[in-house]
Amino acid sequence: MLNKRALITGITGQDGSYLAEFLLAKSYKVFGITRRTSTPNYERIRHFQDKVELIPGDLLDQQSLTSAVKIADPDEIYNLAAQSFVATSWSQPVLTGEFTALGTTRVLEAMRQVKPEAKFYQASSSEMFGMVKETPQNEKTSFHPRSPYGVAKTYGHWITINYRESYDLFAVSGILFNHESPRRGLEFVTRKVTNGVAKIKLGQAKSITLGNLDAKRDWGFAGDYVEAMWLMLQQPKADDYVIATGENHSVADFVKEAFLVIGEKNWRKYVKTSKEFIRPAEVDFLIGDYSKAKRVLKWAPKTSFKSLVKMMVEADIELLKKNSR
Ligand code: NAP
Ligand code: GDD
């Protein structure tokens, strides 16, 4: 039997790197779209770079995306690329709309024109729920995005559904709640905290400066969540699913747990707050109901909150030690 072929936008990102590993282990031929940067940023994929084929392309450039679909001739397309940092979406709202909203249409158009029989996954987000209308949030909960990023993702979500309904494409949206890992970007709160705690442990920093400590998120492990993306494309019918843990914690809870990993009970001694990290509009409370994914996809998260925090703190301590050797 021929190996399946997958094309991933955003392969150099957190999720793209875990998904590529997951698909390689299933003997897929994996293609990834990478955009031009002045120096390559392949840290997350370096350990398997020789096993995947990288195709130059950008979410802003229709021709490059269409050409990538021609080259990869994929059975499955995972659209993970985006301007994914919520805070930046206020300082670069138009760019966020171009990448995160219209970029989705461009990838869908490339698939529609070149390989309409392929299956398409859209990386939708719990940020679409924003000011939540019910708790926990499920696939039927209405949206009230609170940032230009959330608004752009809501567009991406609906254009995916629209292409499914207009052209009968197999196009699905995974509404994923926050998921983290040692590969998380340093600007996101979890990694900022675990990196800060690791630095404090090694005597390289004295404190961490954060914004809103009261916001609550449903945090899972990225390695668990990429399996759900794949499962959505293995179903007989295209549909949308919430992927979450069904548990939430405040930013303060995360900080407290991270300091406990290094044996420090008095986390408040090390944490400062600054208005600089307060957002113009906040998403206060997210918690997902993943019962549909559990029932249909037979998916459930495997990593607890405590083990996620421990994994991230320990990985950051190791990384800092390695870098200083
Ligand atoms: P990430 O680490 O920020 O990765 C984003 C990826 O998009 C990177 O590979 C980046 O490439 C690429 N990219 C950005 N702009 C691009 C452009 N113009 N053209 C081509 N590629 C571009 O994000 P992530 O955490 O892996 O998340 C993956 C997707 O899931 C994103 O769409 C995100 O919005 C969504 N999502 C994430 C979460 C979460 O908690 N992680 C939850 C829900 C939804 P460079 O390496 O060149 O920057
Ligand atoms: N980044 C950051 N930095 N966030 C902080 C800080 C800080 O210093 N202090 C407090 N926070 C709070 C934010 O205000 C927010 O309420 C929460 O921590 C989480 O922020 P992020 O880690 O930046 O993630 P996010 O929830 O805004 O967005 C992530 O999850 C979405 C899914 O809900 C991103 O991965 C998005 O791409 C994703 O769609």
Image (cartoon, grey):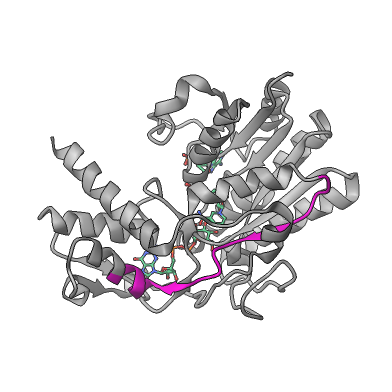
Magenta stretch containing residue 12, yes or no? no
| Residue 293 horizontal/vertical position (percent) | 68, 58
Looking at the image, which is closer to me, 215 or 92?
A: 215
Residue at coordinates 44% horizontally, 76% vertically from top-left? 215
Whether residue 162 sits left or right of residue 3 in the image: it is right
> Which residues lie in the magenta part?
236-256
Instruction: In the displayed orientation, state which residue is furthest to the left.
Output: 203
Whether residue 146 sits left or right of residue 317 in the image: it is right
| Residue 13 horizontal/vertical position (percent) | 48, 42
| Residue 238 horizontal/vertical position (percent) | 80, 49
Establish if 106 lies above or below 228.
above
| Residue 68 horizontal/vertical position (percent) | 66, 26
Residue at coordinates 54% horizontally, 73% vertically from top-left? 286
Residue at coordinates 33% horizontally, 53% vertically from top-left? 312
Looking at the image, which is closer to me, 294 or 45?
A: 294
Looking at the image, which is closer to me, 38 or 183?
A: 183
